[in-house]
Image: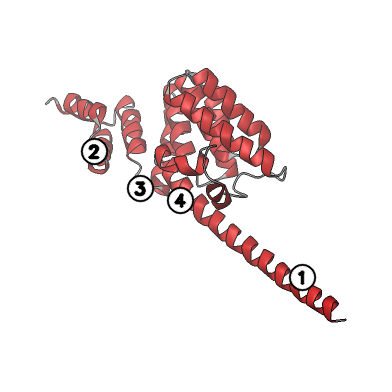
Amino acid sequence: MLPILIGAGLGLLAGAHIEKKKAEKEEAGARAMDDIGKKIQQGNYEETRGLFDDSAEETNYEETWGLFDDGAGETNYVNAVAYYNSGWEWFQKGNYDNAIADYTCAIQLNPNYTFAYGGRGESYRMKGLHDAAIKDQSTAIKLDPNYTFAYGERGESYRMKGLYDAALRDLTMAIEIDPYYAWAYASRGVVYSAVGQKSAAILDWEMALCIQPDYPWVQDRLREIKGW
């Protein structure tokens, strides 16, 4: 009976170890999601490269395990991350069509991939396809109601369509979630300027410069509106 007891004991130890590692993985994933979300909302994509890079070490994937998994398994998860990464690289090069194609592949592999909708929506906006951009950012917001980046992007698309009330709502929401979101202040300032609220525009642009002093076009707008 001794071998059986030893085997049973080892089985219990192994089971406990697996459960412990699973809990650690989930905890690490939650921390990674919080960190990644904040960085991407602020536009700091480069700081997330180790986590989204398809050439990253396995330990990096372990840290993000489950963040984008729709139940299809590790293969779809890793491929979705790789397509997202490739989409961002194309976006950085100004090739928005290829970026959209890769983000779309990421979404097909994981329909709940919030950041892929955000990235594709941004690419649509850069091509002037604001209805498609709004649709993607709306999906991203549905998946994550606190996704600052999506509110900012959707607000910008509303602004480009001349839907200023909707733009103000989204940009204000982005600022409420992240009071240090310089780009949202800058964009909202443009909306205020467009609707004739000069003082509000100045306040937003000044706030944007307080957060991010090196913001040339905001500096130019302030000089113009103040008559410097």
Q: Is residue 144 left or right of residue 205?
A: right
Q: Which residue is mark 2?
A: 209
Residue 43 in sight: no
Q: Nearer the viewer, mark 4 or mark 2?
A: 4
Residue 174 x/y as whole percent: 42, 42
Crowd rating for badge 4 (residues with CA inside 10 Å; few <14, some 14–19, many 20+): few
Q: Nearer the viewer, mark 4 or mark 3?
A: 4
Tell me how far mark 2 sits from mark 1, CA to CA. 60 Å
Q: Dividing the image into 4 quarters, which one contains the C terminus? A: top left
The label on residue 35 is 4
Q: Are marks 2 and 1 in contact (CB under 8 Å)?
A: no
Q: Amino acid at mark 3?
A: Pro
Q: Residue at x 67, y 44 (%)?
A: 74
Task: Pick out the residue farthest to the bottom.
Answer: 2
Q: Which residue is mark 3?
A: 179
Residue 161 x/y as whole percent: 46, 21
Tell me how far mark 4 sits from mark 3, CA to CA. 17 Å
The label on residue 11 is 1
